[in-house]
Amino acid sequence: MKTLILDEPFNLSLADTPFPAAPQAGEALVKVHKVGICGSDLHAFKGEQNFFEYPRILGHELAVEIVQLGSPLAELSVGDICAVNPYLNDGTCIACRRGKTNCCQNMRVLGVHQDGGMREHFLVPATHLYKADLSVDELAQVEMLAVGAHAVRRARLDKQENVLVIGAGPIGLGTAAFARLEAKKVAMLDVSETRLEFVRQLGLAEAINTRTDVISELKERFSGDLPTTVFDATGSAGSMVNAVTYCAHGGQLILVGHTKNELPFHNPSIHARELSLHCSRNATEEDFKRVITTLEQKQIDVEAWITHRASPEELVKNFASWTKPETGVLKGLLEF
Ligand SMILES: [Zn+2]
């Protein structure tokens, strides 16, 4: 069967690998239909991903079909089309015991810490499959949206709140899409006019360019106030630190992206605001199910977010170009 292997940075190859063994109890053998390509996959390709070992089979944004179950399950059957929760938690650590499975102390992420879904078939823990009445294109975007939905759940927004999302990549767009369902008004900030134009076309949020007088632009859109909740989905240390200046007094900053750098926050700025600072990591089963319901109810439409598609053979040739901003990739899909 076809398997894409990232042998080392800048070297993605297509191999013919043996079909997986039969699933054990609790496992499911799945056929992979679509794989969303994430920013972290592109970082791994460029050798910029922390704690990453090569060779590795990438792929954690997955739309799959159940081919065989290792043990019978009430909620899943052969032929079901499912999203995959790639966050394999140990179920026993302090975070898991408190329901925070998204930040398990011993987290193993499919496609990052162990081999993922860029292959025709593989074995997945059945507890990490969520059946959905969605297209396979939509299903391949559930994980990405769940990261945004989780960040919004962390924020506990109310209908009186104005929200700013910094970074109009797929995670930022997902965050804005869910914030919009719960807040009064949402604005997005980005350096790329192409991405901001996409935000305007979707009617997702107010779109502000980083090169403008951002504070004035925010106050103009939010009746003279700054946003009470700011999400940073850039992964840029500079942006994350500067985001404080956009937060209203008494507000909160949610860091959805992450960086390997230190974040030197200016204490007078965060103290004067009595700023609440949260990190938001991955997503839980609750977030995945929320995303599936929201998509099933057509409250969010993500078909337009897919800008590029490739077969396994094409991806080997095109992956390097997908890492370049000028290619204009918002969401790329690998199609088996
Ligand atoms: Zn755990």
Image: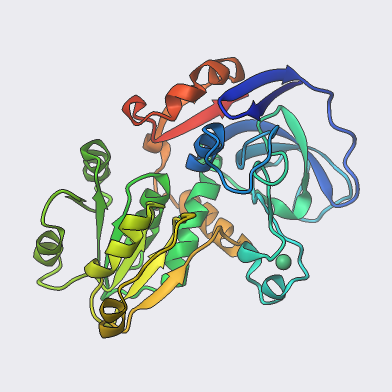
* Residue drawn 20% across the image and 50% down it: 210
Q: Report whether 53 appears left or right of 170.
A: right
* Residue drawn 58% across the image and 58% down it: 289
Residue 253 sits in which quadrant?
bottom left
Q: Report whether 248 appears left or right of 158.
A: left
Give the colour scheme shown: rainbow
For this rendering, which residue is in front, 321 or 219? Answer: 321
The number of discs equals 0
x then y, percent, for residue 202:
27, 43
**Vertical comparison of 243 with 22: above or below:** below
For this rendering, which residue is in front, 149 or 279? Answer: 279
x then y, percent, for residue 243:
29, 64
Q: Report whether 100 appears left or right of 183.
A: right
- Please state the quadrant of the image where ligand 1 appears: bottom right
Residue 246 sits in which quadrant?
bottom left
Q: Report whether 16 appears left or right of 221.
A: right
x then y, percent, for residue 21:
89, 34
**Vertical comparison of 281 with 30: above or below:** below
* Residue drawn 51% across the image and 30% down it: 333
For this rendering, which residue is in front, 162 or 48? Answer: 48
